[in-house]
Image: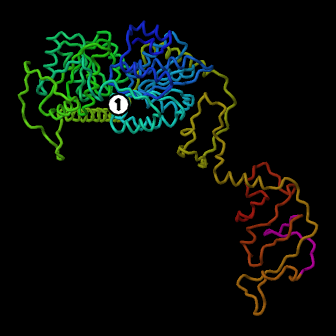
């Protein structure tokens, strides 16, 4: 059978021929026809069997029949890792080379603006990881309402990496009516629950038994102690002259240590794991594909999506906890019908993991005993308080993480102490640079010219013995000490009184309240009422005076205005009679003076400036000094 018999169009057949695809794989033969018909597909196959082409070719052919204007996202492919997303995008570009469709890939770890720009230009197919997809949709930069085809690749890996909740959130954003293509290497119960809720009337395509490795991969097992694993790895690479090898480590710390030890032995190596930036991961993968790096050390998270042509050697430096992970690891080799070899190292405390893997495979892995580093440590593994085996690799990684955290804290404390020491030291006076001396000399020469400016009229002489100039921050004393006079401020008047002093405020208030025009004599004045002494009480049976209405009070006949005599017997015309009570008499009454101010014309003329006590103003009654 060839690809033309599967029903693919000529542009796709031409692109497949350019990629040197001759015959379809079993997963492609079973998945392409129902996918072209618009049915949901459940594909069960291990990695490296051609799953990407199995869903990419039908998507390209169905979407190329009609291209809307403007373009909208009509196909969404969701993957667990960035490397797998990049690989699928490259396949889409290669298979759709002769079709008028546009595709793009989005993932986290890099800036989102270039990805957003591609989305705004218009796309037909979007390849994404769950985190970045939900992030951009939350920002309102993605429209998923026009999705016609949805692909969930590596569904079991989504479950292992904790993305199953994000997948359910993505499904709620998609239209209910759509075609779904579901691919997974294993089918645990959680994945089957998602399949039953997502797929309807689907075609099931199972190429091999679930979790079984490809038959063309040769597997070998070496029993070796933990301390000799790196030595054995270097020995095998050099003995068999391995050009490129992929080594899987249990932890990120272990991956860095393995790569460092290999480089020390003259074998070029690079590490790739989750703590590496996306740029570093892509650079390491590209160097490995180009042959600049001989060994690529990776963790399980980076295992998915690493598709390297003619990769023949895979090493399991540590056996995985999950048996299905072993299938994904060795599936990196023997791809597209090529042969490959998977080498596994097993130390004494990893025999439990080996037993679970052999149970899953249904057979034992051949053991190689003739090597220079046989296992000699047969001590029972250490267990925690719950009886679980303590893995040496995990303990080492945790200790390394604690050491790095303590080192960062010590560095931060040292930086704080250094900053505090610098803050306590007095600042050193800055010496003028040699290059600035000509400028300073020039400024000194120009300074006398500025002083020769015309001087204004001299300021009035300072008033001595007046300590009411109380400015904030200035001590009392001689004005020449506190207020220096310089030619730079010739027009400044330093002898004005402080407006906040009490005497100045009273003078200003008096001037404000003083009448501005002559006071006309009143037409009629009310008679002076007789007031009872304060201690006198009303007789019994008589109500207090304040409770009586005003109309009941006895009225007195108005008297003509009379001039009131002062203490010296002088009379002033136009003044009202005093309204002070009889109880106020004598010197106190005479000192308060009249209640009404004199007319301005009646004020005696004098060249001397008067203060508020000498003005006939409303403030006069508050000054209790006798007049002369």
- Name, please, the residue furthest toward the bottom: 540
- The residue at the point 16 percent across, 18 percent down is 233
Q: Is residue 234 left or right of residue 292?
A: left
Q: Find residue 457 and report its horizontal and vertical position in percent.
A: 70, 30
Counting the numbered discs, the total is 1
Q: Of helix, strand and loop, which one carries label 1?
A: helix
Is 561 inside the magenta-drawn segment?
A: yes
Q: What stretch is highlighted in magenta?
A: 555-572
Q: Find residue 36 and report its horizontal and vertical position in percent.
A: 49, 21
Residue placed most toward the observer, 373 or 506: 373
- The residue at the point 85 percent across, 55 percent down is 600
Q: Name the residue under label 1.
A: 157
Q: In which quarter of the image is residue 408?
A: top left
Is residue 290 among the parts visible in the rendering?
Answer: yes
Is residue 444 among the parts visible in the rendering?
Answer: no
Q: Quadrant of residue 48?
A: top left
- The residue at the point 88 percent across, 73 percent down is 526
Quadrant housing the N terminus: top left
């Amino acid at each position: 059978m060839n690809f033309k018999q599967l029903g693919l169009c000529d542009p796709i057949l031409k692109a497949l021929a350019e990629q040197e695809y001759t015959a379809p794989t079993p997963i492609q033969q079973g998945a392409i026809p129902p996918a072209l018909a618009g049915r949901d597909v459940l594909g069960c196959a291990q990695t490296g069997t051609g799953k990407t082409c199995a869903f990419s070719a039908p998507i390209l052919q169905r979407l190329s029949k009609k291209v809307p204007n403007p373009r909208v996202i009509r196909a969404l492919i969701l993957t667990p890792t960035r490397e797998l997303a990049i690989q699928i995008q490259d396949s889409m570009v290669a298979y759709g080379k002769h079709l008028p469709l546009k595709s793009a890939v989005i993932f986290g770890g890099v800036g989102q603006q270039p990805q957003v720009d591609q989305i705004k230009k218009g796309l037909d197919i979007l390849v994404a990881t769950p985190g970045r997809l939900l992030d951009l949709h939350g920002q309102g930069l993605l429209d998923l309402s026009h999705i016609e085809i949805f692909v969930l690749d590596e569904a079991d890996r989504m479950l292992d990496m904790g993305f199953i909740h994000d997948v359910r959130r993505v499904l709620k954003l998609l239209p209910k009516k759509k075609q779904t293509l579901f691919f997974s290497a294993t089918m645990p119960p959680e994945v089957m629950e998602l399949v039953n809720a997502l797929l309807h009337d689907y075609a099931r395509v199972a190429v091999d038994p679930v979790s079984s490795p490809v038959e063309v991969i040769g597997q070998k097992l070496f029993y070796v102690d933990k301390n000799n694993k790196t030595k054995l790895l270097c020995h095998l690479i050099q003995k068999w002259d391995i050009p490129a090898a992929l080594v899987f480590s249990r932890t990120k710390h272990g991956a860095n240590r393995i790569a460092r030890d290999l480089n020390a032995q003259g074998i070029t190596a690079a590490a790739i794991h989750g703590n590496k930036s996306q740029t570093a991961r892509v650079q390491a993968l590209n160097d490995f594909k180009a042959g600049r790096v001989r060994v690529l050390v990776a963790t399980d998270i980076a295992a998915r999506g690493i598709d390297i042509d003619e990769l023949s050697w895979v090493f399991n430096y540590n056996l995985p906890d999950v048996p299905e992970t072993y299938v994904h690891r060795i599936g990196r080799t023997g791809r597209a019908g090529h042969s490959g070899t998977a080498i596994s190292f097993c130390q004494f405390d990893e025999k439990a993991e080996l037993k679970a893997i052999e149970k899953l495979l249904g057979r034992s892995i051949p053991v190689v005993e003739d090597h220079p580093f046989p296992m000699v440590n047969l001590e029972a593994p250490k267990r925690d308080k719950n009886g679980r085996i303590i893995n040496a690799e995990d303990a080492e990684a945790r200790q390394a993480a604690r050491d790095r955290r303590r080192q960062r804290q010590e560095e931060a404390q040292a930086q704080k102490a250094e900053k505090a020491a610098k803050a306590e030291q007095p600042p050193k006076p800055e010496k003028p640079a040699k290059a600035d001396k000509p400028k300073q000399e020039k400024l000194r020469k120009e300074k006398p010219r500025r002083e020769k400016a015309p001087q204004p009229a001299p300021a009035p002489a300072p008033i001595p013995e007046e300590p009411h100039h109380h400015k904030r921050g200035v001590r009392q004393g001689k004005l020449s000490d506190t207020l220096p006079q310089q030619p730079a401020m010739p027009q400044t008047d330093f002898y004005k009184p402080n407006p906040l002093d009490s005497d100045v405020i009273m003078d200003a208030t008096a001037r404000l309240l003083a009448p501005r025009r002559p006071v006309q004599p009143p037409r009629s004045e009310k008679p002076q009422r007789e007031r009872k002494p304060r201690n006198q009480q009303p007789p019994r049976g008589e109500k207090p005076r304040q409770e009586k209405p005003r109309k009941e009070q006895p009225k007195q006949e108005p008297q003509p205005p009379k001039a009131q005599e002062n203490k010296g017997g002088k009379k002033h015309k136009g003044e009202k009679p005093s309204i002070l009570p009889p109880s106020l008499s004598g010197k106190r009454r005479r000192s308060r003076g009249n209640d009404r101010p004199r007319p301005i014309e009646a004020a005696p003329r004098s060249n001397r400036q008067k203060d508020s006590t000498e003005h006939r103003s409303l403030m006069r009654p508050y000054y209790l000094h006798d007049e002369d």
